[in-house]
Image (cartoon, rainbow, N blue to C red):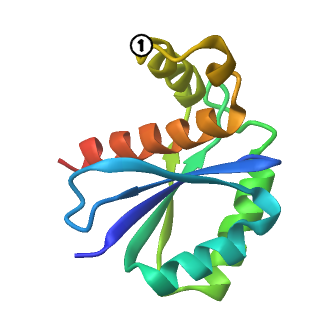
Amino acid sequence: MARILAIDYGRKRTGLAVTDPLQIIAGGLATVSTSELFEWLKAYMLREQVERIVIGEPRQPNGQPSENMARVEQFVNRWRKAVPEVPIEYYDERFTSVLAHQAMLDGGLKKKARRDKSLVDEISATIILEDYLRSRQ
């Protein structure tokens, strides 16, 4: 089997998470500069087999699209044109940043580590992927 990769797309930074090849366990992969994301993903897929990409769908608590949605849609459209053999699908990402901060607290991370926004992005991508995997069961 191939991996599933999750993206927590941000204006400056993007968090990434990936499953094991059996698609059982989700783990943080990296946080990359959003401007380098497209090329980073293409290089990653030369090394690892990826079955699909799940990208966080940014919505406000009331369900309306957030201001980041236009950027996410732009990326998704570019991906679908350039790499149609690897499907990309949206998954609701509401509250993942809050859950990521809570996971950091629960994990006992010091205040300085909790301020690391790249770590928050990577954990958020992992939460998106874990939720996605649970929804498929």
Residue 62 x/y as whole percent:
63, 22
Q: Residue, x 70% and y 77% (percent of image)? A: 39
Q: Position of residue 10 (x, y in %)?
A: 74, 46
Number of residue marks: 1
Disc 1 designates what residue?
A: 106
In the visual, does 79 lie left or right of 48? right
**Mark 1 residue crowding within 10 angstroms, few (<14) / some (14–19) / many (20+):** few
**Image position of 131 (left or right of 67):** left
* Residue found at x 46% / y 82%: 47
What secondary structure is marked by label 1?
helix
**Residue drawn where x is 36% and y is 39% of the image:** 131
**Residue 113 locus on image (x, y percent):** 63, 23
Is the residue 67 above or below the residue 113 in the image? below
Q: Please state which of residues 81 and 40 is positioned toward the viewer in this rendering.
A: 40
Q: Amino acid at mark 1?
A: Asp
Quarter holding the N terminus is bottom left
The answer to whether residue 95 is left or right of residue 21 is right
Q: Quadrant of residue 103?
A: top left
Residue toward you, 91 or 9: 9
Q: Judge whether residue 8 can be spotted in this image.
A: no
Relative image position of residue 55 (x, y in whole percent): 55, 55
Residue 62 seen in the current view: yes
Depth order, front residue of 59/6: 6
Horizontal placement of 135 versus 95: left or right?
Answer: left
Residue positioned 52% across, 44% down in the render = 125
